[in-house]
Each structure stands twice: as structure tokens, then as C-alpha cells.
Amino acid sequence: MKQTHTGIVKAALVMHPDMSPISTSEQQITLTWDGVEGDKHAGVSMSADSPDFYSRDSEVRNTRQVSLVSEEELAKIAAILDVPELQSAWLGANLLLSGIGDLTQLPSGTRLIFSQGAGLVVEDSNPPCTAPGQVVQDNYTDKSGLTTAFPKAALSKRGLVAWVEKPGKINVGDSVQVWEP
């Protein structure tokens, strides 16, 4: 593995089950073996989301414990959509990082090691869908078509999903080292 980037945590967020699909900004989040404490996507396991291998009611390992987005990539998506900004909370993200402009391009197996010792392993890119697009549309009612335009604009820029390799705390302002396989 080689260290390729160093970034900064610009926002730490929790998607509370009763408030989804929007995340709530916190000063600090706690990573447990389940994921982000109190988050909708927390859990060691989840229901299968692809009928290709298992029935939808099957329990499988949760590899989507944490959602990460890049400040730089959100700015690119906003520019494509011609809106002033995209907030990480609107995408249901858990961490907004700065300084890693090509975050979505990091390969599976990349490790993100935070300054207080917590660690994540990248599982995959987070495919864009219309749910965050609807939140964007709800925040820019003077524009039309954002719900369906979002997935295309966010393609290869939507961020990553990861699982917890080492529990710990992550604060806004903490640094993160990126180690690629």
C-alpha cells in the first residue's frame, strides 16, 4: 500500500432513521463495528439488495456502513446542475472530505486512516440515484428537472461507501490519510 492523499474532514454527519434521506451535521461521529453510531445504515449485516445472488430478504454483510463525499466533487456536480451548492447532508453522507478531489475514483480496498486512529476500508463507489436528486430539487424549487438530472451529473463523482476496519471517533477538522492498494 502507498499513501496517495491527505485530506481534512469538513463535515461529520449522521442519517438518523427518522430523518432520512437527509443527514444531520455533528461535530463528532463515533465509528463502531456497526458503522456510524445512530446512523440509518449502521449494522454488521443488512438485507441483500441484489437478487442476482440472494433473495432480497436474505441477510448479508453490510459493506455500506459509511458514506463519504468530496467537497471538490460536490462542487463539480453543482456546476453541472447549475446550482450554487450541493450540501453533503442532502446526499445522506456521513463524511465530507476536502483535499481528495478524485475521491470517487479510489479503488476498492483503499484504507482511510483518520488522525484519531479510526479506519475505514473502501468497498465501492456510491452509485447516484434520484433520491438525493429529489432533495436537491426540493432545495432549488426555481429550477426544474434536478431530480432526474442529478444521477447523470453525479456519475463518477457521487463518493464512496466503506466499512469500519477500526472503530473510533472522527471530528470535524481531523486529517485523513489515504492508502491505496
Image: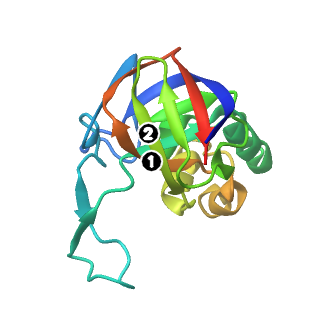
In the image, taking residue 58 as reference, residue 5 lies left or right, namely right
Residue in view at x 60 percent, y 37 percent: 179
In the depicted view, which residue is nearer to us: 83 or 57? 57
Q: Hey, what amino acid is under mark 2? A: Leu
- Residue 159 higher or lower than 148, as above or below: above
Mark 1 closeness class: few <14, some 14–19, many ≥20 residues within 10 Å: many
Residue 25 numbered mark, or none: none
- Residue, disc 2: 120
Residue in view at x 57 percent, y 34 percent: 87
In the depicted view, which residue is nearer to us: 38 or 79? 38
Mark 2 closeness class: few <14, some 14–19, many ≥20 residues within 10 Å: many
- Residue 51 higher or lower than 8, as above or below: below
Q: Quadrant of residue 166?
A: top left
In x, y percent, where is residue 74?
67, 40
Residue in view at x 35 percent, y 83 percent: 51
Tell me if residue 60 can be seen. Answer: yes
Q: Quadrant of residue 88?
A: top right
Tell me if residue 92 can be seen. Answer: no
In the depicted view, which residue is nearer to us: 143 or 76? 76
Marks 1/2: CA distance?
Answer: 6 Å
Residue in view at x 48 percent, y 57 percent: 131
- Residue, disc 1: 162
Q: Quadrant of the N terminus?
A: top right
Q: Secondary structure at mark 2?
A: strand
Q: Are marks 1 and 2 in contact (CB under 8 Å)?
A: yes
- Residue 146 higher or lower than 95, as above or below: below
